[in-house]
Amino acid sequence: MIRASLPQFSTDEIKSLVESMDRLEAINRYVVFQSKTHRLYVKDNRIIKVVHIGTQTSAFP
């Protein structure tokens, strides 16, 4: 079980994010679950940080 102390996300939102993960990496003391839109940083079975990966529109055609 992975616990999250992130009040801005519901359990269903966390489940949805986890199901969309494409890659898993160990970075320093964290396990990072990555998708095209989010990264979940997990340490000691707790989600420490959720990062939204936004897209930028290019100024160059």
Image: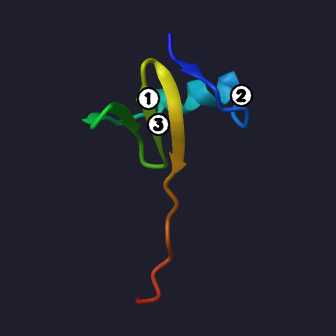
Residue labelled with disc 2: 10
- Indicate the secondary structure of the residue bearing disc 3: strand
Find residue 45 and report its horizontal and vertical position in percent: 45, 18
Quick one: label 1, few (<14), some, or many (20+) residues within 10 Å?
A: many
Amino acid type indicated by mark 2: Ser
Residue at 73% across, 32% down: 7
Question: Real-space Cα distance between discs 2 and 3?
Answer: 14 Å
- Indicate the secondary structure of the residue bearing disc 2: loop
Say if mark 3 contacts mark 1, CB within 8 Å.
Answer: yes
Find residue 5 and report its horizontal and vertical position in percent: 64, 27
Vertical side of 17 occupied by 36: above or below: below
Amino acid type indicated by mark 1: Val
Say if mark 2 contacts mark 3, CB within 8 Å.
Answer: no
Quick one: label 2, few (<14), some, or many (20+) residues within 10 Å?
A: few
Amino acid type indicated by mark 3: Leu
Residue labelled with disc 3: 40
**Chain-order first, disc 1 or disc 2:** 2
Q: Residue furthest bottom?
A: 60
Q: Quadrant of residue 58?
A: bottom left
Residue at 48% across, 27% down: 19
Q: Residue furthest top?
A: 1
Residue labelled with disc 1: 42
Residue at 66% across, 32% down: 6
